[in-house]
Image (cartoon, helix red, strand yellow):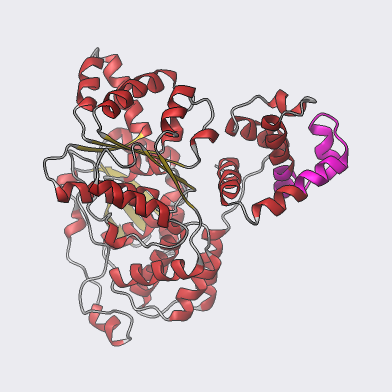
Amino acid sequence: MTHQELWQSALGEIEINISKANFITWFKQTTILDKKGGRVVVGVPNGFSKEWLQNKYHKLILKSLRNIFNDIKEIEFSIYSPSNNPANENNNTDSKTLNQKGLIIQDEQLGFKEFEVNKDTNLNPKYTFDTFIVGSFNELARAAAQGIVEKLGTLYNPLFIYGGVGLGKTHLLQSIGNAVSKKNKNTKIKYISTDKFTSELVEALYNGQIKDFKNKYQKIDLLIIDDIQFLTGKEKTQEEFFHIFNGLYQKNKQIILSSDRPPKAIATLEERLRSRFEGGMIADISYPDIETRTAILKIKAKEKNINLPDDIINYLATNISKNIRELEGALNRIIALVQLNSILPSASQIESIVTSIAAPPKKSISYKTILSLVAEFYDMKVDEMINKSRRRDIVFPRQVAMYLMRKELKTSYPFIGEKLGGRDHTTVMYACDKLTKELEKNNNLKQEIDSIKEKLYI
């Protein structure tokens, strides 16, 4: 296994354990410079990144590498020039040997195909409609996305796509951008995360270049902003984005947004922005069914030239059900083991991989954490949930808090009732039963609950 293959396999696991914004910020220009015995040298682009990775992600990086090579005991960080990235080194994997065992589809180098992100648009060419797997869980969003390519700015504007982590929102958003660019090279396209947009705004304000910042965005024909929920709590960013949104919309320029929740559930979002987000097309991406998960794994394995038996594919698809990114992470780790040992991993190894990904260790939480996050999610105060109000917009979040306290903390009904204003235990029982039944048929509620649970364990 080459250094680059080792690092790509480790990155596959790192990515599912941190936020997408942090992954892009700190790991985008990293690589492995050297591996000797139990020592790995990780290349970083500058001193600031070196210090941050050492202090914040050292344990995660070591754990991810040791899941591939358990003899790795030490990590060093070294500054290097990205232009001298050793990722192009010759691959020393004996692919012919692997091929004889029937694991490799073609006699060629293993590894992950590298794509260069377009510096002007921020689009990654690997994200296309051709590689986007369609199922009942995402067909509306996919249909809306393709419609936009044909009628940019006039069919669905804005397009608001929401769904949980790792379900393919970014893939679909970038597929739109790449398809529009292919159709018309002169279209000015910008894909950007909300965090990056905010950083650009802060820098412009600091340098007195806010007018240039606004002018740059007003010239865009297709603006794609990922993770728009991170606008919460950023009043100045919301104000500037509101003006940019209006300017583009009035000129029939296309706007596409993604979020982990629908507009109505984004806390502290200005009402004028919420109404504009809801004024176009809203499409959700829910959890993929088992047929779709199986198809995704087979296609990804084929892309990486690995021929995995159906029983392994089926095991992964059955046991990892809520996150496509986790599916790919498990597949990448199995591929790494194949590359390392030239044989398929054992059943116990595969079970260990799935367990570590699908059921990561949970941090300790309290009922106060749950109350705080539920209140934040539904844009209200904790005191409002605890008081005696029977308003629908307060009763429902209160029931969600009861449900989560019961499911996540395993606390008694009387305890939950006491912490939520001294309510009777029968009230708590009713709330938990109601939400349990509702979750069986309401995908939107599932995504709201999952979004809150994700924040519980970050």
- Residue drawn at point x = 51 percent, y = 57 percent: 287
Frontmost residue, 306 versus 376: 376
Residue projecting furthest to the top = 208
Q: Residue 330 versus residue 439: which sits nearer the camera?
A: 439
In the rendered image, residue 425 lying in the magenta stretch gets the answer yes
Magenta segment main secondary structure: helix
The part of the image, by quadrant, that contains residue 378 is: top right
Residue 130 among those drawn in magenta: no
Question: Going by the image, does 218 lie left or right of 53?
Answer: left
Which x, y percent locates residue 318?
Answer: 54, 70
Q: Residue furthest left?
A: 186
Residue 140 vertical placement versus 302 (above, below)? above
Quarter assignment of residue 396:
top right
* Magenta residues (range): 403-432
Is residue 322 something that shows in the picture?
A: yes
Looking at the image, residue 346 sits to the left or right of residue 362; the answer is left
Quadrant of res 143: bottom left
Residue 375 location in percent, x, y? 64, 30
Viewer-side residue, 347 vs 302: 302
Residue at 29% in and 21% down: 203
- Name the residue at 41% across, 38% down: 227
Q: Can I make out residue 30 in this image?
A: no
* Residue 244 x, y percent position in the rendering: 30, 24
Tell me if 93 is positioned left or right of 16 in this view.
left
Indicate the quadrant containing the C terminus: top left, top right, bottom left or bottom right: top right
Q: Quadrant of the N terminus?
A: bottom left
**From the viewer's perspective, is 395 left or right of 104?**
right
Q: Position of residue 61 (x, y in %)?
A: 41, 50
Picture layout, residue 301 above or below residue 393: below
